[in-house]
Amino acid sequence: MSGEKPPVEICKGVNGLDKVVLREVRGSSAEVYLHGGHVTSWRNDHGEELLFLSTKAIFKPPKAIRGGIPICFPQFGSHGNLDQHGFARNRFWSIDANPPPFPTVSTNKAFTDLIFKPSEEDLKIWPHSYEFRLRITLGPGGDLMLTSRIRNIDTKPFSFTFAYHTYLSVSDISEVRIEGLETLDYLDNLKAKERFTEQGDAITFEAEVDKIYLGTPTKIAIIDHEKKRTFVLRKDGLPDAVVWNPWEKAKSIADLGDDEYKHMLCVEPAAVEKAITLKPGEEWKGRLELSAVPSSYRSGQLDPQRVLQG
Ligand code: BG6
C-alpha cells in the first residue's frame, strides 16, 4: 500500500463527532459531519478553503454548525410554524449503506450517501413519514455536488420548503459581485417578506442583505475580485436563491465573530415561494453543484463551459 489516503474516510471531527472526509486524487477535499448531514469544508487542490466556517461555530448537537452548508428542511427560515430552518440541520444523519441507484452511473470515487429519517420526536412536531437521502460527491476537477432525494413514505401528501444554506468564503464582501440575479423579483426578509424587483446592474454589498430571489436561473456566478476567483453555482429542482449577509447584525449572532461577515456570503439554492408537495410514493430531487474557477471570468460570460475554459 502506498501512503495515499483513501477517497472516502470516516473519522472523528471536532468534539469527537463523526465526519466523512472525501478526497480527490488531485488534492481537493471535502468534509461532511453526520450531525446535520452538514458539509463543513470544501478545499481546492491547493488546499484553500472555499466555504466559510465561523471561528465561533459550535459543534454541540443539536445546535446547528455556523458555516459550511446546513440543510434547511422541512422549512426554510420562518416560512412556517417550525423552528427557523426546520430541524434536519439539528439531527444526526446516518451513512446510507445501500442507497437506491441514480439513473446515471458515475465513475466518481469520492462520494458518500447519507440518510435522515424522522424519529418519534420529529413526528410529533412534523407528522409526515419520509426518507431523506443526501449524496455528497467531489468531482475529478474538485467540484462539489450535493443531491437530495426526499421520498414520501406516508399515506398522505405533504409539503415542505428547502434550502442548501451555502456559506461561501470570500476575501472581502465589499469586493464581491453576484451575476445571474439582476432584474429578478425577490422577497425582502428585512421588509416583512415584501416583494420587490431588483433594479441594479450588478448585485454588490454595502449593508445587510436578506433576500429570496424568485424564479432564478440554473447558473449563478459569485465573483470575488480580490481573490480573482469565481464560484459557479449550478442548481436543479430549486427555483429560488436566498442571498444573505448579516453585516453589523453579526454582533448579535453568538456563534459568528463580529467582523466575520466580511469574509462570508450565503447564496442558497432554495424552494421557498412555492412549497414542494409530494404525494405518497413520490420523490423530489434537488441538486447543487459548486465549482471555483480563476476569474478570467468577465461580466456577462455566464456560459459555464467558457468559464471553465477561462
Ligand atoms: C438565512 C435567512 O437563510 O439564514 C436569514 O434568510 C437568517 O433570515 C439566516 O438570519 C441565518 O439563520 P440561522 O438560523 O442559521 O441563524
Image: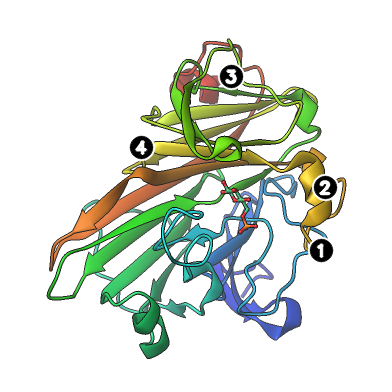
Q: Give the alpha-carbon distance from disc 3 to disc 4, as whole Å.
A: 27 Å
Tell me which label, 1 or 2, sits earlier in the chain. 1
Circle 1/circle 2 CB separation < 8 Å: yes
Mark 4 lies on a secondary structure that is: loop
Q: Which residue is mark 3?
A: 310
Disc 1 residue type?
Lys
Circle 2/circle 4 CB separation < 8 Å: no
Q: Nearer the viewer, mark 3 or mark 4?
A: 4
Identify which residue is drawn at 76% across, 26% down. Answer: 206
Disc 3 residue type?
Gly
Q: Which residue is mark 2?
A: 260
In this view, the residue in front, 220 or 163, is: 163
Disc 4 residue type?
Pro
Question: In the rendering, at what x and y percent does residue 254 appear?
Answer: 79, 63
Tell me which label, 3 or 4, sits earlier in the chain. 4
Density class for disc 1 (Cα within 10 Å; few <14, some 14-19, many ≥20) is some
Q: Give the alpha-carbon distance from disc 2 to disc 4, as whole Å.
A: 29 Å
